[in-house]
Image (cartoon, rainbow, N blue to C red):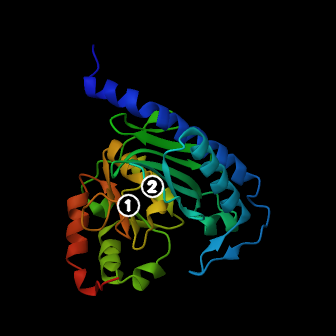
Amino acid sequence: MKRPADTISAERRWTPYLHFAVQTAYEAGRLTLGYFNRGIAPDFKQDDTPVTIADREAELFIRQRIETRFPDHAIMGEEFGDSSRDSSYRWFVDPIDGTKSFMCGVPLYTVLLGLEVDHRIRVGAAYLPALNEMVYAAEGMGCYCNGRPVHVRELDDPSRGVIAFTDPVTFEQFHRAEAWRRLQSAFWYRAGWSDGYGHILVATGRVDLMLDPIMNAWDCGPFPVILREAGGYFGDWSGHETIYGNEALSTSQKLLPRVLEIIGSSDADRQPR
């Protein structure tokens, strides 16, 4: 049986970048494990978020790998900013997504690496070093966890669904309190300690909805392609696939209309950012 030509074309185009992303995320993740549960003291940035030596060293490692292999590509990273290189290829780097978890010795932090080409995320890798779990995808090639194909859960009733989040206070801070209350009521179970791991849980069929009322582009670089290839959705709270919405949610395509309906009915608490 012949494979579709578009699948073969996608493999030829994206496989080198996917292999690079997976290997680089893995090696950066192993670097962070040298500091994990070692009691290292964080610094605090102007926005009061923590950063550690592990964050900085892992991002420098990733940036060096990209600059050596793809010197014409642009880079946007959480700790060292934008390379300001003019390129249609742009890597988004978060060396430790979930630094608070990392600081607390909770093994749910992730190394995130996503490649945007012509304004669309085409390749992504998300690695949980402390769990040795790698989730990755490339456009037209499917989504995998440690080599096994994965897919979102095809649930259409939120009353039997699991919703994930990171910090409940942020829903108040970023004017999503009413939407959060409605969604909590609609879903069966609510689980925290998420960050990027929550989006991974959706992509791998273990959670039905992950919500972030605030999100930076580097915090979600790999997730559009990971969720898309897993049969799901990653984007803003209005149904647009993007990493630039300053917010994010992941869910299945089947559940998305109901989620957007619940959110839309609670827009009265929304204020401009």
Q: Which residue is mark 2?
A: 221
Identified at 56% across, 48% down, the residue is: 127
Image spot of residue 216 (x, y percent): 45, 67
| Quadrant in the picture for the C terminus | bottom left
Taking depth in this image into account, of 79 and 39 the one nearest to the observer is 79
Q: Amino acid at mark 2?
A: Gly
For residue 110, above or below residue 271: above
For residue 204, above or below residue 220: above
Residue 129 in sight from this viewpoint:
no
In the picture, measured across the screen, residue 20 lies left or right of residue 210, that is: right
Taking depth in this image into account, of 105 and 229 the one nearest to the observer is 229
Q: Which mark is residue 186?
A: none
Image spot of residue 175 (x, y percent): 35, 84
Image spot of residue 174 (x, y percent): 39, 82
Identified at 40% across, 39% down, the residue is: 138
Residue 41 in sight from this viewpoint:
yes
Identify the secondary structure beneath mark 2. Answer: loop
Among the 4 quarters of the image, the one containing residue 54? bottom right
In the picture, measured across the screen, residue 101 lies left or right of residue 184, that is: right
For residue 268, above or below residue 255: below
**CB under 8 Å between callouts 1 and 2?**
yes
Identify the secondary structure beneath mark 1. Answer: loop
Q: Which residue is mark 1?
A: 243
Q: Earlier in the sequence, mark 1 or mark 2?
A: 2
Among the 4 quarters of the image, the one containing residue 11? top left
Q: CA distance from mark 1 to mark 2?
A: 7 Å
Tally of numbered tags: 2
For residue 116, above or below residue 160: above
Q: Amino acid at mark 1?
A: Ile
| Quadrant in the picture for the N terminus | top left
